[in-house]
Image (tube, rainbow, N blue to C red):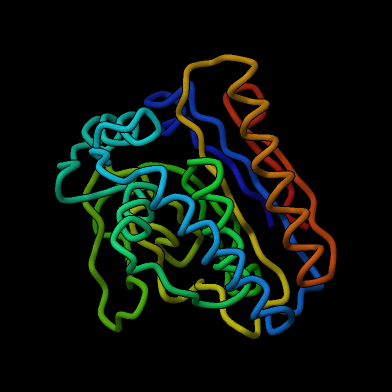
Amino acid sequence: MRFRLEPDFLSLFPQARIGVVLARGLDNHRAAPECAALLEEEVGATAARLAGAEIGSLPEVEPWRRAYGAFGLKPSKFRSSLETLLRSALSGRLRSINPLVDLYNTVSLRHRLPCGGEDLATLEGDLRLTRAQGGEEFIPLGGTASEPTEAGVVIYRDDRGVVCNAWNWREADRTKLTGSTTGAFLCLESLHPLRSESEEALRRACDDLAGLVAGHLGGEARVELLGEERSEIDLA
C-alpha cells in the first residue's frame, strides 16, 4: 500500500507540503483522560489567544480559503478543518472524541495546521491526494448515504472511494479512527510558500504529533514529508 500526491493535485498546488505520521501498534484506549486533558488545555489557550479575532482573516486560515476557491468551492460554505477547529475552540464546542483524535486536534491547534487521520486497516488499495472526476462514493462521518463528489474538488481517495472530501473539509465514516484502531495514517498539511522555515515548521508539528502518539498510546510512529520533489511513500 502506498500514498501519493497525484499530478493533477500538484499542478494546482505545487507549493503544498503534506506531513505524514504513520503510527502502528497503538492502544487507542490507553491514556484517554490524559489525551482529553491535553486537548482541553490547548482549547483554553487557543480561545484566550483568539478572543475577538476574525477567524477567516487569520494568516493561517486565509490561504485555505483561497485554496478552496481555486478548486471551485465557496470558502464561506466549505471551511477547512483548521478553520472549523479554531471556531469550535473559540466557541467552547470542541470536545474529546478518542485519544488519537484528541492528540491530532491538539497538534492542529498548537501549530495552526490542518490535521486528520485514517485507520490504516480500513484503506483499500493505494491512498491518493488527487482531484475528483465527479460522482465518487463519499459517505461522510456519521452518515449512511453517499454524497457524491463534485468534479475538480481535491480529495483523498483509495480504490473504493473518497476518504476525505474537499481536501480536509470532511472525513469519511468508513476510514474513521475508533477505539479499536491500532494503525493510523495521520497527516498535517501546509500551503505556505516554499520557504525552508515553513518545511521546518511542518516537520516540528509532525514530530510533536509522533511523540505524543507514541508516548501516550504506545507503538511506533514515523514521520514522512511529501511535496513536488517527493510525491510518493510506502505505507507498509
Where is residue 40? Give x, y as percent. 52, 66
**In screen coordinates, is 31 left or right of 198?**
right
Q: Quadrant of residue 233?
A: top right
Q: Residue at x 65, y 85 (%)?
A: 180
Where is residue 15? Give x, y as percent. 48, 22
Where is residue 36? Give x, y as percent. 58, 73
Residue situated in front as seen by the camera: 103 or 125: 103
**In screen coordinates, is 183 left or right of 142?**
right
Q: Quadrant of residue 37?
A: bottom right
Q: Residue at x 50, y 62 (%)?
A: 159
Give above or below for 59 relative to 234: above
Q: Residue at x 34, y 29 (%)?
A: 63
Give above or below for 14 relative to 110: above
> Residue reaching furthest top?
195
How many labels, in total? 0
Q: Quadrant of the C terminus?
A: bottom right
Residue situated in front as seen by the camera: 41 or 160: 41
Q: Residue at x 15, y 42 (%)?
A: 74
Where is residue 33? Give x, y as percent. 64, 80
Q: Quadrant of the N terminus?
A: bottom right
Give above or below for 199 relative to 3: above
